[in-house]
Image: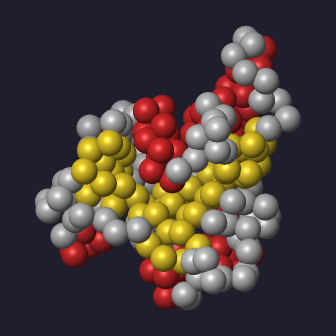
Amino acid sequence: AAHPPHHPHPHPHHPHPHGHWELVYADDDMETTWEGCCEPDGYGELSRDAVDGLAEALGISKENPTDAFYDLGSGVGKIVLHAAVAGFAKTSVGVELNDGRYRAALAMRNDVVVNGMADISNRVQFINGDMLDADLSKATVIYMNHACYPEDTRAKIAEKLLSTARSAQIIVAAPTIPQLEASGRFKADPGFLLLPMELYTYGTPLKIYRRVAADTAA
C-alpha cells in the first residue's frame, strides 16, 4: 500500500474542522494534483487519530460498529488493527500483496493479543494477496489508497468493487473512483475528507462514496 503522492495542498473554499479531520470543499481541479507525482517506493498509513476521524465522518463507532471493515492495500495493518481495537468494526480485514508488510501485520496483531490490549484474535484477518483476487462479498466499509496504481489497474479495481462488493455500504478512496457514482449505485459526499498521515506533513484527501438507498445490489 504505497503512500499517496506528494501534491500541492488544495485551496479549500470552506474547510470544516472536526477534531482530527477536516472536510474540504476543494477546487474542481484537485483530482489532477494526484497525477504524475506518485512515489511507489514510499510508504505511509493514516495515523491513529486519522482513523478515529474517519470513523467519525463515516458514522461508525464502538456503539455503532460496521459489520466488516476492509483495507485494500493494508500495509503493516495499523488501520485494520485500530478499527478492531477501537470497536469501529465487528470484523476487520486487511489485504496486502507485499510479503514483508503482511508478516509485520501478523506480528503486530499477535503483539496486541499477547499483551492483552484487546481480544481481537477472532475479529482481525490479514490476507497476503492481490486485492483483485480478494473476496469482498462481506465487506460493508472499504478503504483504499490506490494513488500509485496505473490507470488500467484502477479501472479493474472499480469493476471489481461494482461487481463483487455487494454488501459494501461505504467506499472510501484516494484518488476518486468516478465509476462508482456513474453506476448510479453510489453517491459521493461533497468535498474531500482531509486526514493526517504518519510520516508526512500533508493531509490525505479521501472521497467518500455511500450506496444509494434505492440500490438493491447489496
Count of marks overlaid on the render: 0
Q: Nearer the viewer, residue 62 or 23?
A: 62
Residue 76 in sight here: no
Relative to 149, 81 lies left or right: right
Q: Is residue 42 left or right of residue 70?
A: left
Q: Residue furthest top?
A: 115
Residue, far bottom: 183
Q: Nearer the viewer, residue 28 or 52?
A: 52
The residue at 74%/74% (across/down) is 218
Residue under the image location 51 percent in, 53 percent down: 58
Residue appearing at x 79%, y 61% in the figure:
138
Image quadrant where residue 40 sits: bottom left
Q: Nearer the viewer, residue 35 or 48?
A: 48
- At x 65%, y 73%, the residue is 161
Which x, y percent locates residue 29? 21, 74
Residue 111 percent coordinates (x, y): 72, 18
Considering only vertical position in the picture, is 58 above or below 191?
above
Q: Residue furthest right?
A: 122
Q: Give the image's coloring scheme.
A: secondary structure
Is any part of residue 199 visible from this angle? yes
Q: Position of residue 78 (x, y in %)?
A: 58, 35
Q: Which residue is nearer to you in this view: 154 or 181?
A: 181
Residue 110 sits in which quadrant? top right
114 sits left or right of 174 in the view: right
Please state if 199 lies on the left or on the right of 33 as rendered: right
Relative height, residue 85 to residue 148 (above, below):
above
